[in-house]
Image (spheres, rainbow, N blue to C red):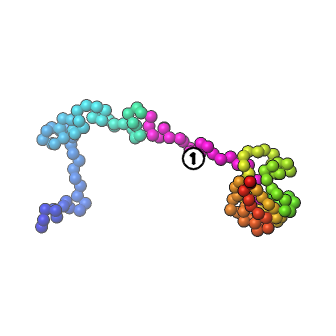
């Protein structure tokens, strides 16, 4: 038998230290809490998250689900289904869509989304395409290009 083998019996429980019961108990007088201050007083110390009066972290950071993007890119969006009524082999740009009355406001560069189906071949000039929109336009025999 060695010293490191001398362990308490399995299931045995250690007694709770009796604080403030004299010097012989090992935790007399100030009970190991120091001499003065908020954490030495009776009762609980501070609530969770308290930073001594400084604005706590949970109040410093932005709230709700997502932090807002400061300089968010704004696009004028249109779905593939809205392009289906255009003439075959026509060039589709933001200006041509506004002229045709399909888009009423210019909210930024043109972005094509992939909702719906298209059967006519179009030469689409837009800043951004979703993957599904690009596949549908090229499957119909059209092309996806960035504006000059």
Question: Which of the two residues, 123 or 47, is positioned nearer the viewer here?
Answer: 123
Say if residue 113 shows up in the picture: no
Residue at figure coordinates x 31%, y 32% from the top left: 38
Q: Quick check: 45 left or right of 135?
A: left
Question: The N terminus lies in which quarter of the figure?
Answer: bottom left
- In the rendered image, residue 63, in percent from the top left (x then y), is placed at 54, 42
Residue at figure coordinates x 39%, y 36% from the top left: 51
Q: Is residue 148 above or below residue 24?
A: below
Residue at figure coordinates x 41%, y 40% from the top left: 49
Instruction: Specify few, some or many for label 1: CA neighbours under 10 Å numbering under 14, 14-19, or 20 or more.
Output: few
Question: Which of the two residues, 40 or 82, is positioned nearer the viewer here?
Answer: 82
Q: Quick check: 78 left or right of 59?
A: right
Prevailing SS of the magenta stretch: loop
Question: The C terminus lies in which quarter of the figure?
Answer: bottom right
- In the rendered image, residue 106, in percent from the top left (x then y), is placed at 76, 45
- In the rendered image, residue 6, in percent from the top left (x then y), is placed at 15, 62
- In the rendered image, residue 77, in percent from the top left (x then y), is placed at 73, 51
User: What residue is disc 1 on?
Assistant: 66
How many numbered callouts? 1
Would you identify the image quadrant in which residue 12 lies? bottom left
Of all residues, the one furthest to the front in this rendering is 148
Q: Which structural element holds mark 1?
A: loop
Residue 68 painted magenta: yes
Q: Is residue 23 above or below residue 9?
A: above
Would you identify the image quadrant in which residue 70 lies? top right
Question: Which of the two residues, 114 or 111, is positioned nearer the viewer here?
Answer: 111
Residue 75 painted magenta: yes
Say if residue 53 shows up in the picture: yes
Q: Which residues are magenta?
A: 55-80
């Amino acid at each position: 038998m060695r010293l490191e083998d001398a362990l308490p019996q399995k299931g045995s429980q250690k007694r709770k230290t009796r604080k403030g019961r004299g010097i012989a108990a090992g935790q007399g007088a100030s009970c190991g809490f120091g001499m003065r201050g908020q954490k030495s007083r009776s009762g609980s110390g501070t609530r969770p998250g308290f930073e001594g009066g400084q604005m706590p972290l949970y109040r410093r950071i932005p709230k709700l689900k997502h932090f807002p993007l400061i300089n968010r890119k704004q696009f004028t969006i249109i779905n593939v289904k809205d392009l289906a009524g255009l003439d075959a082999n026509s060039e589709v740009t933001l200006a041509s869509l506004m002229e045709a009355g399909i888009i009423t406001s210019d909210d930024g560069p043109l972005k094509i989304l992939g909702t719906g189906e298209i059967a006519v071949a179009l030469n689409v000039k837009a800043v951004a395409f979703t993957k599904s929109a690009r596949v549908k336009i090229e499957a119909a025999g059209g092309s996806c290009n960035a504006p000059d």
